[in-house]
Image (cartoon, rainbow, N blue to C red):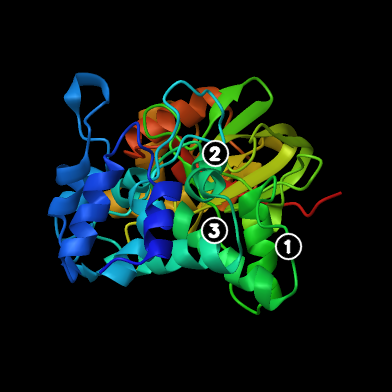
């Protein structure tokens, strides 16, 4: 039998415009175990194109497993939560369907409901914020945003904080991770354009990604997979926890490394890669000339003759006594089969001045 309190719970948390409340009450009064057929049974199908009002994930074993009546009633606020389709409020966009679609095959079903129960019953957070906050922050329905936020809620309770909906979640989450003695998340850059690490507009370099910022919008570089020295200016366009651009104004001595952008290591170990160096950091690597000449079996006279210079001049280049100008550098690269000019460049990473 369903109790009076359980009936009132159904009436409170089941929207009669989408679901037949009496059918739910009737079903619960006739069964000890509630199967997922209850959702199709009570659904009024009032959505566009006669689609189900409930989460489609509740039709399979990933989204729902049979429960006792008491356990089912406890989860009614989540199963039957609906958003106003006419509302443009960013705090009223998420549903149970979004949580499942974002975490398909990544989490077991109970971890989702356990976290929902913790936020709703233990912390007394409103349903619309529970379902929508992480989407509002990230701007996408994907990834581990919901579970990261739930982990954050537990740490807030442990350390006596009540800022459950911070303005910049990824920043607050890293703060809490460090407070708990855990490793913070390092946010790496994503590709811009055709597999490029950045976009360039003169002296401006723009790196795309999701970057933690402080309350004034300044990027927190210790949590970003970029090491940059001798930058003139740095700013960030990221709002909340959404994707944006990290913008650098470079100087002649700027050197920039990024984390794992070209990394194909199977062991997932971290690697830093230089993606930009200013002209003042570059010098000619004379050692390459001897290496390539020897590899190709040429004498110094052979190379000098091929590029139309004197043997003594070439010897000075190879020893590092002097440096070839652009005209002869092009000829050297051609004759010594040096595929990329980067192969004859050495870099000096200046410390910040």
Q: Position of residue 108 (x, y in %)?
A: 28, 67
Helix, strand, or loop for circle 3? helix
**Residue identifier under label 3:** 149
Which numbered tag is attached to residue 162? 1
Residue at (18%, 24%) from the top-left corner?
A: 50
**Residue identifier under label 2:** 136
Residue 305 visible within the image: no
Q: Position of residue 307 (x, y in %)?
A: 41, 28
Viewer-proximal residue among 230 and 31: 31
Viewer-proximal residue among 74 and 85: 74
Q: Position of residue 211 (x, y in %)?
A: 61, 45
Viewer-proximal residue among 261 and 278: 261
Sort mark 3 into few (<14), some (14-19) or many (20+) by Cα contacts within 10 Å: many
Sort mark 2 into few (<14), some (14-19) or many (20+) by Cα contacts within 10 Å: many
Residue 129 visible within the image: yes
Helix, strand, or loop for circle 1? loop
Q: Is residue 70 left or right of residue 236?
A: left
Sort mark 1 into few (<14), some (14-19) or many (20+) by Cα contacts within 10 Å: few
Q: Position of residue 254 (x, y in %)?
A: 70, 41
Q: Farthest residue in the right direction?
A: 353
Report the number of numbered marks.
3
Helix, strand, or loop for circle 2? helix
Residue at (50%, 36%) from the top-left corner?
A: 139
The earlier-in-sequence mark between 1 and 2 is: 2
The earlier-in-sequence mark between 3 and 2 is: 2
Residue at (28%, 39%) from the top-left corner?
A: 19
């Amino acid at each position: 039998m369903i109790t009076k309190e359980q009936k009132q719970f159904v009436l409170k948390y089941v929207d009669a415009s989408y679901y037949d409340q009496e059918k739910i009450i009737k079903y619960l009064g006739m069964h000890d175990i509630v199967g997922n057929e209850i959702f199709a049974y009570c659904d009024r199908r009032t959505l566009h194109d006669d689609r189900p009002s409930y989460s489609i994930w509740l039709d399979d074993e990933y989204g729902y497993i049979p429960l006792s009546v008491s356990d089912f009633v406890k989860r009614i606020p989540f199963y039957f939560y609906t958003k106003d389709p006419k509302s443009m409020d960013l705090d009223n966009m998420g549903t149970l369907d979004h949580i499942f679609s974002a975490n398909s095959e990544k989490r077991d079903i109970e971890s989702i409901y356990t976290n929902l129960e913790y936020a709703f019953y233990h912390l007394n957070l409103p349903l619309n914020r529970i379902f929508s906050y992480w989407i509002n922050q990230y701007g996408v329905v994907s990834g581990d945003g919901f579970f990261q936020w739930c982990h954050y809620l537990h740490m807030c309770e442990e350390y006596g904080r009540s800022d459950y909906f911070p303005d910049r979640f990824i920043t607050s989450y890293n703060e809490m991770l460090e407070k708990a003695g855990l490793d913070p998340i390092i946010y790496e850059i994503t590709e811009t354009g055709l597999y490029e690490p950045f976009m360039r507009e003169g002296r401006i370099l723009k790196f795309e990604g999701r970057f933690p910022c402080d309350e004034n919008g300044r990027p927190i570089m210790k949590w970003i997979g970029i090491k940059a020295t001798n930058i003139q200016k740095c700013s960030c366009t990221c709002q909340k926890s959404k994707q944006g651009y990290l913008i650098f104004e470079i100087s002649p001595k700027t050197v920039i490394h990024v984390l794992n952008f070209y990394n194909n290591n199977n062991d997932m170990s971290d690697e830093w890669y230089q993606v930009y160096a200013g002209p003042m950091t570059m010098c000619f690597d004379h050692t390459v000339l001897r290496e390539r000449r020897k590899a190709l079996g040429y004498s110094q006279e052979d190379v000098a003759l091929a590029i139309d210079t004197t043997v003594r001049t070439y010897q000075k280049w190879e020893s590092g006594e002097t440096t070839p100008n652009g005209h002869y550098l092009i000829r050297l690269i051609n004759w010594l089969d040096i595929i990329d000019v980067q192969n004859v460049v050495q870099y000096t990473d200046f410390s910040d001045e």
